[in-house]
Amino acid sequence: MIEPLRPFELQRSNRYGFLANVRAAPIDYSIGYQTDQGVSPTFSAHLEQVADAVERVSSRESSICEIGCGKGDFFSMLTARSFTMLTGFDESYEGGDSRIKKSYPSAHDGPLEAQLLVVRHVLDYIVDPVTYLVDLHKINGQDCEVMIEVPCFDWISSQGALWDLTCERVNFFTEQSIEALFGSDLIGIDRVFGEQYLLVHAHLRGRDEVADYFEADAYQSELLKHGYALSSDLTKQLGDSAYWIWGTGSKAVMFLHHHLNWRPEHAPLGCVDINPMRQGTFVPSTGIEIFSPSEFGELFDVGQPVVVLNRNYINEVSQSIEELTGASAELIVL
């Protein structure tokens, strides 16, 4: 079944300053939703750096709960580092680790009594993240520390990265909005993964919910203009060359959605993805076929450029193409 396109309207929180898609609707992640990035050596290296951050603030005997642990990659890293008091929650989890519950935490799961809650790429997917933090504290049953990772909207706006505005992602945080959200409970903020993410360390305590409202903001229209210009530049740069897209994460999905809406005649030969669960399927919205790296190696001709949507992966992609084809490809980074 093909799902209809979802609406997107970015507005700004008057009280805290983060931006949100005020027309967001819940998404069911429990059936076949593929968020796994752990198959990428580049992303695995990033996860190791986040695990280093957890080590700096927690002992091996600390009670740690990971909320939204996906397929369990980061959870497994903490296990490998001999953390002994681990639990996790994610309705999309597909593994067999009994410490991970295949749901999201509710009052029935409390008290969790965690000393540290790891909340990576969850707060940006939650409608009303402020109330969510209040509820999470109640479910935990005690004050604790949190390690939160979210995309950095400061980076998105500085790069004009329209492709980071997705219907799945509800909230977009700046450093300033994180400071407003946690106030004196904030311990520190670091920019990680090439400054694309914010890694937040804070105290999570009981708090009063304060009335907030959202106001119209110009960022969405500005990013659309920038995205159109990048799409136009790419078309000129490629000329008549047939090209490939490497990776089918959210950036690539959204790039293709906008680019082919503006220029439907400019479709790529296909997309390449190292995640086996995506291979042999098709990109949402545009229906571009997704190939395995080995299939790409058989189909690729020298002279066909490869477009990469995230510059963090450029070295990994370049090395993969040379290993697969014995040749270098022209890589274009958006």
Image: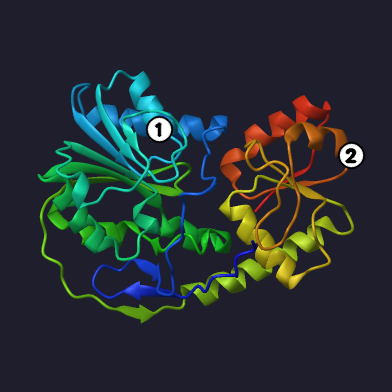
Q: Residues within 10 Å of mark 1 (few under 14, many from 20)?
A: many
* In the foreground, 94 or 142: 94
Taking 61 as reference, is 20 above or below it? below
Q: Position of residue 122 (x, y in %)?
A: 36, 51
Position of 61 with respect to 28 (left or right) is left
Position of 319 with respect to 150 (left or right) is right
At horizontal 63% and vertical 56% (from top left) the residue drawn is 253
Q: Quadrant of residue 209?
A: bottom left
Query: Of the residues tagged 1 and 2, which is closer to the observer?
Result: 1
Count of numbered marks: 2
At horizontal 62% and vertical 39% (from top left) the residue drawn is 277
Distance between mark 1 and mark 2 Cα atoms: 37 Å
Q: Which quadrant is the N terminus positioned in? A: bottom right
For residue 74, which numbered disc appears in the image? 1
Q: Position of residue 7 (x, y in %)?
A: 52, 74
Q: Amino acid type of disc 1?
A: Phe
Q: Residue extending furthest bottom? A: 216
Q: Residues within 10 Å of mark 2 (few under 14, many from 20)?
A: some
**Residues at discs 1 and 2 in contact (Cβ within 8 Å):** no
* In the foreground, 228 or 166: 166
Q: Circle 1 — which element?
A: helix
Q: Quadrant of residue 226?
A: bottom right
At horizontal 59% and vertical 54% (from top left) the residue drawn is 251
Q: Amino acid type of disc 2?
A: Asp
Q: Position of residue 124 (x, y in %)?
A: 38, 57
Q: Quadrant of residue 162?
A: bottom right
Q: Circle 2 — which element?
A: loop
Taking 212 as reference, is 265 above or below it? above
Position of 328 with respect to 222 (left or right) is right
The residue that label 2 is drawn on is 301
For residue 242, which numbered disc appears in the image? none
